[in-house]
Amino acid sequence: MQKIDSRVYLLSCGHFSVDWAQGAIPALLPYFISVCHLSYQAAGTLIFANILLSSLLQPIFGYYADKVSRPWFAPLGLIVSGFAVAAMGFVSDYAVIFALSMLSGTGSAIYHPEAARMASGLGGPLKGRAMGTFAVGGNAGFAAGPAVAGFCAYVFDPKALIVFALVNLFFALLLHARLGSILRDLKTQGAKISAAKAEQPCNEWSSFGRLCVVIFCRSVVFSVCNAFIPLYWIGVLKTEPSSASLAITFMWALGAVFTYFGGFFSDRGGFVRVLRLSFIVMIPAMALIANSPNVPLAVLAIIPASFGLFACYSPMVILGQTYLAKNIAFASGVTFGLNTTIGGMLSPLVGRLADNCGIQAALQVLWIAALIGAIASLTLKTPAALKKARGATKRKAS
C-alpha cells in the first residue's frame, strides 16, 4: 500500500495545536464567569467572537496566500493561537480576555489555508488520505483542548494554561524546520504536474458555489449536534449531565476515525461519491437521533450519524481545491471557515425554536439540513467530469 508523505503528519500535529487552543475556550467559560463576573450572554460572546473572526479571516488569508505565498504563516498561526490561550490564565479583565479570544481565532485563521494547501500538495495521488490525516489532527485537538483546559483551570492552576503555548511553540519550531524541504518538493511536484498537463489551472465558480451549499448544510448539522444533543439527552432522554457529555465525546471519537477513512475511500471510490454517500446516510441517522425514544437507540444512531457528518469532511476540502484550482488556499479558507461559522450563527435560531416548540421539535432541523445537503450534492461535478468539460471548452475556443 502506498504511503503518504510523513510531513503530512507534522501538518496534522499543527492542526491539532490550533484546534486544541480553539477548543479550550468553551471549557474556560465557567472560569471566566467566576473571575470576571460575566453574564451567560457575555461569556457566549467570547465563543462567537473567536469562531466568527477565525472563519471570516480564513478566506482572506487564503486569498492573500494565493497571491503572495507566505508558508511561514503556518508556524506563526500555531504560536499566536497557543500564546493567546496561555495568556488567559494570567488576566482577569473581560476586555483583555475578549481580545485574546479573537487573537486565538486569528491564529487559527492564519494556519489553516497555508497548511491545508501544503497537506494537499504533499498528498500527491493520495490527496484524500492526506487531507483525512490532516483533518484528524483538528478533530483530536477539539477533543483534547477542553479536557486539558478544564484540568488546568479547575484542578491545577489557571496559569498552567501555559502548556498551550509550550506545545504550540514546539510544533511551530518543528514545522518551521521542515518548511524548506516541503516547499522544494511542492515546487518540483508542481512543475512536473504542469509539464504533464501542459495547461493552466482554472476556476469553476459555479461548481464551488454548489459545494458551498453542501458545506452550509453540513455546518448546520455539525453545530446543532454540538450545541443541542447534550441538552436533548438531559431534557428528553432524562440522562445525567455526565452521560450527555459522553454522547458528544463518543461522536467526536468516531469522527476522528471516519474522517480518516472518508479521505482514504475517496482516493479509491471518488470524492463526490463518498460525499453523496455521507449525506444519504446522514438523513435517516439524524432523524433517528432526533426522534429516539430511549438512550440505547440514540447511542446506536450516533454511529451512522458520525459517519455521515465526518466522512464527508476531506472530500469537501479536496473538491473545493479542485473547483478553484487557481486559488487553492482561498478555497481551503472558505471550506474550513464555512464548516464552523454558518452553523454557529444559526444555532441561536434553533435555540429559539427549542424555547418555543421544544428541543425535540427543534432537532428536526438535523435531518432536514442533511436532506438539503444530499440534494445539493447530486448537482456536483466529479473531478473527471470537470476535466472533460474544461477540455471541451478549450477545444471549442481553439
Image: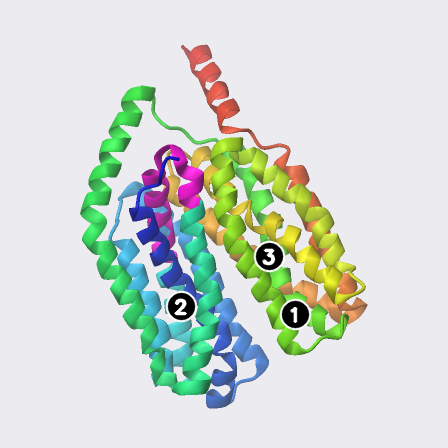
Q: Label 2 is placed on what type of residue?
A: Ala
Q: Residues within 10 Å of mark 1 (few under 14, many from 20)?
A: many
User: Would you say 26 lies left or right of 350 here?
Assistant: left
Judging by the rendered image, the residue that carries numbered circle 2 is: 21
Q: Label 3 is placed on what type of residue?
A: Phe
Mark 1 or 3: the one toward you: 1
Residues under labels 2 and 1: Cα distance?
Answer: 22 Å
Q: Are marks 2 and 1 in contact (CB under 8 Å)?
A: no
Dot 2 or dot 1, earlier in sequence? 2
Q: Residue at x 20, y 39 (%)?
A: 184
Please tell me in which quadrant of the rendered image residue 199 appears. top left
Dot 1 or dot 3, earlier in sequence? 3
Secondary structure beneath dot 3 equals: helix
Judging by the rendered image, the residue that carries numbered circle 3 is: 222
Residues under labels 2 and 3: Cα distance?
Answer: 19 Å
Q: Residue at x 52, y 35 (%)?
A: 271
Mark 2 or 1: the one toward you: 1
Q: Residues within 10 Å of mark 3 (few under 14, many from 20)?
A: some
Secondary structure beneath dot 1 equals: helix
Checking the image for residue 333, the label placed there is: none
Residues under labels 1 and 3: Cα distance?
Answer: 13 Å
User: Would you say 369 lies left or right of 148 here?
Assistant: right
Checking the image for residue 230, the label placed there is: 1
Q: Residue at x 23, y 38 (%)?
A: 185
Q: Label 1 is placed on what type of residue?
A: Pro
Predominant secondary structure, magenta span: helix
Q: Quadrant of the N terminus?
A: top left
